[in-house]
Image (cartoon, rainbow, N blue to C red):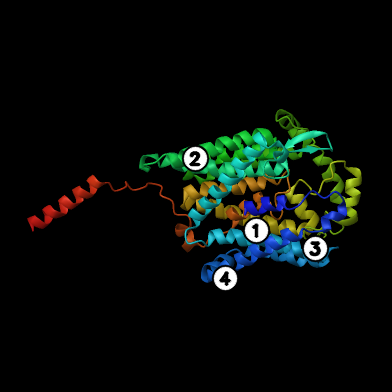
């Protein structure tokens, strides 16, 4: 999933004109079509599990369905529909993980394979192959480090999500250290986390770094058994995080906080852009159509006023409003509410898995305050879906079974003692 999003960045270059937003990459289209077809075939083969998962996730299906319908009133319906097909791939790939015979193992494989590929290669490119690992930004005459991506914010996102995965695995390994014969997994995840922190320094993506700190803190707090049993306390922590993060949207309230983080109180011009584009939504109730706002003459107008050529609102909720209107915002709100209930439910029943799900969910909500996180192929959106999709109650224990109190592994001496006891009982009889 994250690999597919990164590959999308490799296969396209930044558009130099607004009209370029309407043109797609043939190679990218072929790759995603093949991946989507394979994903659908896999889900059809899993029949009952797929149907059960779809049946209990009506809010998410309704949101995606409305996105499809909104392509009808887009100024470019063919382009909007193609983008919706691509967005459908995000949902398909997440469902493949959750319908796996061992979903928790599938999540671990997803994190391990993407983490041990994207993070070390990014380090390699930035440290030894600067022509590939960094780019010159002519707009403000600066060098930015991008690693395997072609955008520093996307590098920050990769560090955010894979870093949280590494923290989660480290907490699990430390918790079960008495029952592990090998420390290699702990060492491997520690090295991965160290590389992520190193990349954060070069990516200079404050939103991703702040979300990483909050997500890690949330997992640390919920790793305490006494607090896990008090869900009300978890609610308080989540609300406090949302309030603190929300202050960044109001320069008069969060200005000191932004300056303390070394950032402009206007969020590098974001607040000015927001006030400008809100009035450009010609249909506040239904929006301009799925992924259709940043296209055509509207984008030409925006680019003529801003030297940095924005192609997103840098706010996930505003992005949904522009494309899908208040109807889309309302449907997204339902997804968020039901998704939070699901994440909390997993935390209650399977705390180990629930920590990661809750962290990904909260990070998705906070990240979208200053970045367009609820967009197709965005890794934050993909992980948000992973956490927000409800797993049927009967499958929860199978899907996220983790040993909270692992049984002591059998040793030769233990087995011999068992044999001796059984032999003595037979003799006694």
Whether residues under marks 2 and 1 lie with C-beta atoms below 8 angstroms apart, the answer is no
Report if residue 330 is visible in the image.
Answer: yes
Which mark sits nearer the N-terminus, 2 or 4?
4
Q: Residues within 10 Å of mark 4 (few under 14, many from 20)?
A: few
Determine the CA span between mark 1 and mark 3.
18 Å
Which mark sits nearer the N-terminus, 3 or 4?
4
344 vs 365, left or right, is left
Which mark sits nearer the N-terminus, 2 or 3?
3
Helix, strand or loop at mark 3? helix
Whether residues under marks 1 and 3 lie with C-beta atoms below 8 angstroms apart, the answer is no
| Residue nearest the observer in this picture, 231 or 216 | 216
Residue linked to disc 3: 79
62 vs 137, left or right, is left
Q: Is residue 164 above or below residue 322?
A: above
Residue linked to disc 1: 90
Helix, strand or loop at mark 1? helix
Residue 410 placement (x, y as % from top left): 29, 48
Tell me where residue 174 sits by quadrant: top left
Task: Identify which residue is drawn at 83% across, 60% down.
Answer: 288
295 vs 143, left or right, is right
Residue 188 is labelled as 2
Residue 351 placement (x, y as % from top left): 47, 48
Determine the CA span between mark 3 and mark 4.
27 Å
Determine the CA span between mark 1 and mark 4.
16 Å
């Amino acid at each position: 999933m994250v690999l597919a999003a990164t590959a999308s960045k490799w296969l396209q270059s930044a558009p130099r004109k607004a009209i370029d937003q309407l043109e797609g990459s043939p190679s990218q289209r072929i790759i995603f079509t093949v991946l989507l077809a394979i994903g659908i075939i896999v889900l059809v083969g899993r029949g009952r599990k797929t149907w059960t998962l779809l049946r209990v996730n009506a809010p998410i299906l309704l949101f995606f369905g409305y996105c499809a319908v909104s392509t009808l009133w887009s100024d470019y319906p063919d382009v909007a529909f193609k983008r919706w097909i691509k967005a459908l791939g995000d949902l398909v790939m997440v469902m493949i993980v959750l319908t796996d015979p061992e979903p928790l193992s599938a999540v671990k494989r997803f994190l391990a394979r993407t983490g041990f590929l994207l993070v070390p290669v990014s380090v390699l490119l930035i440290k030894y192959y600067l022509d590939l690992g960094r780019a010159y930004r002519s707009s403000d005459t600066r060098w930015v480090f991008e690693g395997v991506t072609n955008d520093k914010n996307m590098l920050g996102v990769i560090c955010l999500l894979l870093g949280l995965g590494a923290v989660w695995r480290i907490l699990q390994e430390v918790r079960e250290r008495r029952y592990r014969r090998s420390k290699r997994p702990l060492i491997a995840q520690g090295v991965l986390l160290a590389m992520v922190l190193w990349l954060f320094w070069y990516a200079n993506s404050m939103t991703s770094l702040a979300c990483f700190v909050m997500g890690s803190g949330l997992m640390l707090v919920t790793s305490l058994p006494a607090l896990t049993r008090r869900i009300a306390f978890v609610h308080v922590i989540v609300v406090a995080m949302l309030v603190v993060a929300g202050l960044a949207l109001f320069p008069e309230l969060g200005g000191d906080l932004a300056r303390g983080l070394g950032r402009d109180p206007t969020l590098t011009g974001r607040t000015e852009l927001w006030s400008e584009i809100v009035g450009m939504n010609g249909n506040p109730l239904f929006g301009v159509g799925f992924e259709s706002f940043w296209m055509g003459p509207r984008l030409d107008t925006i680019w003529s006023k801003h030297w940095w050529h924005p192609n997103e609102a840098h706010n996930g909720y505003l992005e949904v409003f522009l494309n899908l209107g208040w109807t889309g915002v309302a449907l997204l709100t339902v997804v968020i509410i039901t998704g939070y209930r699901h994440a909390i439910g997993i935390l209650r029943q399977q705390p180990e898995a629930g920590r990661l799900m809750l962290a990904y969910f909260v990070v998705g909500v906070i990240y979208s305050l200053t970045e367009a996180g609820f967009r197709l192929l965005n890794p934050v959106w993909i992980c948000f879906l992973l956490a927000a999709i409800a797993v049927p109650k009967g499958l929860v224990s199978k899907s996220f079974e983790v040993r909270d109190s692992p049984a002591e592994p059998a040793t030769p001496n233990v087995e011999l003692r068992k044999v001796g006891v059984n032999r003595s009982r037979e003799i006694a009889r």
